[in-house]
């Protein structure tokens, strides 16, 4: 506002306002202009990378115009905003998404064609923005798409990692990690060198008296690192609304560069300070559902939440409202416990900077925050050593202790005769060393806590947060079942299916209201429609088969059943159960006579996913899959009957190709361990059936699509604990079929079995914590049912169509509406 152009000159500005391309010709003109000026190339020097860059810049210019208008609208209407704080945003590619969301893909296709390029090749040039590990980061990306598409005034806040999730190479069957430097050329971000925040670390707290004699805490000393904002426009689908994702990058604070040292010739040490500051936002931690408690990670968390809160508070203060109105203007959602320090930081700002009293400040804080829990796995629950927090953030530790003190006083009043509850719910765990329990801090500091699928939301209330339900009441806890954006996961990934659906239901409106898919069910008996449906699936499988040939040099027959399990590799997700099942199938095929073999259904087992670099067992699972593939794929007796493929470097753009090509996908976690899962939704929406356990969102998918359309098996979550107990304290015999699998592995059928002993031993000699043996037989039986049902293609396709027609519930638009109404209390902005 301070830098506004005076009224009389605005006419010129309005006259020359940039409009963005409106037609094919204008698009071409923009592309040529960017090639020749921004990229300083020419038609004699324009490869696909340059064409990609110029096309992206043409779209970016268009987006930024709408972005400006959206931000102005949000500011002038003074509406309540949502801030989604997530350490991960797994965005994937942006160009295709931008083309589809602004409705100009056909224009771009024709334009690029006239300029001498194929649009698919140009889209394929883009490097994935892989600033996330898996489901949690991709959920954040789907939510951004829905927030913009539904016209909510919302910002995402994250870190601009220089290195995203590592690239996975498979060398001799083993995972090798390669750094993912993705920022060479990123047309989608706007550096805002004028939007910076200085962030303090370390130092000490000095108590002093202010002019009114009140004791105040001053946080002094330590080091300062500067956060620089990079903005990424997020276009909504079929709306001009374009929201902002603000990512913070770290750099040495100005003045921190030690010229004294530099002039004295101590170049290295002066540069070292600089590099130390830049390290904060350098890398994404590559762990999914696992916390390692590294100091740099805590630094990242504080750096990011402090910069974001400074920004949010700065924006609020411009409105000149009273602090009590803060929660009416601001809703902050904590994506997992990673941003929990934001609770403490806001309390610190209100107390130490703004001079509010504790109770008033705490009221504002708790009314502002909502917390989403994504896991009950103990190894994923964040805890930080008290000593580390004290060292890095001395003032914050004091505030955490005060929050805990006041909280425990309330608990004590409520349960005067229960000493043990204080120990159980304390934010400070009295262990050696003492730890700050971040999930408890997040619960205490938020007004709503949600899980991400019904079973998961029930589980958090009966396990990790049980005591908190008795303290705060059940109303504080709620469920918002996850969802996915149908724009990316149907329209973009599977354009032909999207088109076929639109031709049946009458329009593309289902992309904005996914429940409209239910009209499809009327056509399930239409033979011609079923045929077209099957043709699209087959074409998608042909495309994947070609990719497998080029990437893995394995020939697969597209008529086989494509059985896919792509997700992070984790023992709880049980890729080991899948590969043991594959080995079992292989052994059975080997036992058969050639005549019998001829009657079997050909299958391609496709795996993909990254293992955390320090997760040895997960890496052995990858190795076993590759070892099995190396033997099975070359076995002349087996031929097309079984192929085993491990797809290297699974990421968002590969998911867009793999998902539409699956007949069957596997979501087979030990019951009670997968909070929700979201790829299960993507596969069903793309006309594939799923085999799964009664876990996470599988349960709600079953309820929506009908249990006749899903292959469920395995132990129920309520029986898991008893079985585990029995394994540990009673006798526990391994399933006989599984023993045969183990014998084959150990006799060297798949090469040196040394590496696989631990995997076998986890089941046989240890407690089989993930119940692989308990679920093995029912898994095999259910896979047999899959084979039988797949033979009847007519019925199979009908099941797929019915399932798709009933998937409306799983749109992330539904999630966002639930968050908006039940947690944030925000309204969309009229456009
Ligand atoms: O493992 C969960 C998935 O089940 C879930 O679908 C996804 C989104 O809610 O979040 C995943 N998750 C959980 N990723 N990290 C965690 C724990 O920090």
Image (tube, rainbow, N blue to C red):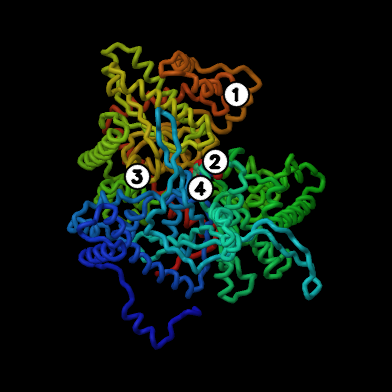
Local packing at callout 1 (Cα closer than 10 Å; few below 14, some 14-19, many 20+) is some
Q: Is mark 2 within 8 Å of ligand 1?
A: yes
Name the residue tied to disc 1.
Answer: 767
Please indicate whether residue 111 sits to the left or right of residue 686 in the image: left
Look at discs 4 and 2 and give the one toward the viewer: 4
Name the residue tied to disc 3.
Answer: 656
Look at discs 1 and 4 and give the one toward the viewer: 4
Residue at 48% of width from left, 36% of height from top?
Answer: 611
Q: Which mark is residue 289?
A: 2
Look at discs 2 and 1 and give the one toward the viewer: 2
Residue at 38% of width from left, 49% of height from top?
Answer: 128
Between 170 and 429, the residue placed more toward the observer is 170
Disc with the residue nearer the chain's start (1 vs 4): 4
Please provide percent x and percent y for residue 480: 52, 50
Please provide percent x and percent y for residue 676: 50, 42
Query: Above or below — where is 13 with respect to 451?
Result: below
Residue at 50% of width from left, 63% of height from top?
Answer: 229
Name the residue tied to disc 4.
Answer: 284
Please provide percent x and percent y for residue 491: 32, 50
Residue 708 seen in the current view: no
**Dot 1: element:** loop
């Amino acid at each position: 506002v301070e830098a506004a152009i005076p009224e009389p000159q605005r006419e010129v500005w309005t006259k020359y306002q940039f409009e963005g391309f409106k037609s094919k010709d204008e698009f071409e003109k923009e592309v040529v202009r960017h090639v020749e000026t921004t990229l300083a190339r020419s038609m004699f020097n324009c490869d696909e990378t340059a064409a990609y860059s110029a096309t992206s810049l043409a779209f970016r210019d268009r987006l930024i115009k709408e972005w400006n208008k959206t931000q102005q609208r949000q500011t002038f209407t003074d509406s309540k905003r949502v801030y989604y704080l997530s350490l991960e945003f797994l965005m994937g590619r942006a160009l295709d998404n931008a083309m589809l969301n602004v409705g100009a893909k056909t224009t771009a296709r024709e334009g690029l064609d006239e300029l001498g390029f194929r649009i698919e090749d140009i889209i394929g040039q883009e490097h994935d923005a892989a600033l996330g590990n898996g489901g949690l980061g991709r959920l954040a990306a789907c939510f951004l798409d829905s927030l913009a598409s539904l016209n909510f005034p919302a910002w995402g806040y994250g870190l601009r990692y220089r290195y995203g999730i590592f690239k996975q190479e498979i060398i001799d069957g083993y995972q090798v990690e390669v750094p993912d430097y993705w920022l060479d050329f990123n047309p989608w971000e706007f550096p805002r060198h004028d939007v910076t925040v200085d962030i303090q670390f370390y130092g000490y707290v000095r108590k002093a008296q202010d002019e009114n004699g009140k004791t105040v805490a001053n946080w002094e000393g330590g080091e300062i690192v500067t956060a620089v904002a990079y903005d990424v426009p997020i276009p909504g689908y079929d709306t001009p609304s374009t929201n902002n994702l603000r990512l913070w990058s770290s750099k040495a604070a100005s003045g921190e560069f030690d010229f004294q040292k530099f002039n004295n010739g101590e170049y290295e040490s002066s540069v070292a300070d600089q590099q130390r500051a830049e390290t904060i936002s350098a890398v994404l931690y590559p762990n999914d559902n696992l916390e390692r408690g590294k100091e740099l990670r805590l630094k990242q968390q504080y750096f990011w939440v402090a910069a974001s809160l400074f920004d949010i508070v700065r924006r609020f203060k411009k409105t000149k409202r009273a602090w009590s109105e803060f929660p009416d203007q601001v809703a902050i959602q904590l994506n997992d416990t990673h941003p929990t320090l934001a609770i403490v930081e806001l309390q610190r700002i209100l107390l130490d900077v703004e001079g509010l009293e504790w109770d008033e400040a705490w009221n504002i804080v708790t009314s502002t925050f909502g917390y989403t829990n994504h896991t009950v796995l103990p190894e994923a629950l964040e805890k930080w050593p008290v000593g580390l927090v004290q060292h890095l953030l001395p003032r914050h530790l004091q505030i955490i202790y005060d929050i805990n003190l006041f909280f425990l006083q309330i608990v004590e009043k409520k349960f005067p005769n229960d000493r043990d509850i204080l120990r159980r719910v304390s934010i400070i765990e009295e262990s050696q060393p003492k730890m700050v329990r971040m999930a408890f801090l997040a619960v205490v500091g938020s007004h709503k806590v949600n899980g991400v699928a019904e079973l998961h939301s029930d589980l958090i209330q009966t396990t990790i947060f049980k005591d908190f339900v008795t303290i705060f009441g059940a109303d504080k806890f709620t469920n918002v079942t996850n969802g996915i954006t149908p724009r990316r996961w149907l329209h973009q990934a599977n354009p032909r299916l999207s088109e076929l659906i639109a031709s049946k239901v009458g329009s593309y409106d289902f992309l904005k209201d996914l429940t409209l898919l239910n009209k499809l069910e009327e056509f399930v008996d239409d033979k011609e429609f079923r045929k077209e449906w099957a043709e699209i699936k087959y074409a998608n499988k042909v495309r994947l088969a070609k990719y497998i040939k080029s990437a893995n040099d394995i020939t697969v027959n597209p008529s086989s059943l494509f059985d896919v399990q792509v997700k992070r590799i984790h023992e709880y997700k049980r890729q080991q159960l899948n590969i043991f099942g594959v080995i079992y199938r292989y052994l059975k095929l080997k036992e058969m006579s050639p005549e019998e073999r001829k009657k079997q259904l050909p299958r391609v087992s496709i795996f993909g996913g990254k293992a955390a670099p320090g997760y040895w067992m997960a890496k052995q699972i990858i190795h076993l899959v590759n070892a099995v593939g190396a033997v099975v794929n070359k076995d002349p007796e087996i031929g097309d009957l079984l192929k085993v493929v491990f797809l290297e470097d699974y990421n968002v753009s590969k998911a867009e190709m793999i998902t539409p090509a699956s007949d069957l996908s596997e979501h087979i976690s030990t019951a009670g361990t997968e909070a929700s899962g979201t790829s299960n939704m993507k596969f069903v929406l793309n006309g594939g059936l799923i085999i799964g356990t009664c876990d996470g969102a599988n349960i709600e998918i079953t309820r929506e699509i009908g249990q006749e359309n899903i292959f469920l098996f395995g132990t129920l979550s309520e029986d898991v604990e008893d079985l585990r107990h029995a394994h540990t304290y009673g006798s526990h015999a391994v399933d006989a079929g599984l023993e045969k699998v183990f014998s084959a592995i150990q006799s060297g059928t798949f090469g040196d079995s040394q590496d696989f002993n631990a995997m076998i031993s986890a089941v046989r000699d240890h407690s089989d914590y993930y119940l692989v043996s308990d679920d093995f037989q029912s898994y095999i039986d259910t896979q047999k049912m899959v084979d039988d049902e797949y033979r009847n293609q007519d019925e199979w396709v009908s099941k797929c169509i019915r399932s798709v027609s009933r998937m409306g519930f799983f749109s992330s638009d539904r999630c966002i509406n639930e968050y908006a109404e039940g947690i944030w209390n925000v309204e969309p902005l009229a456009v």
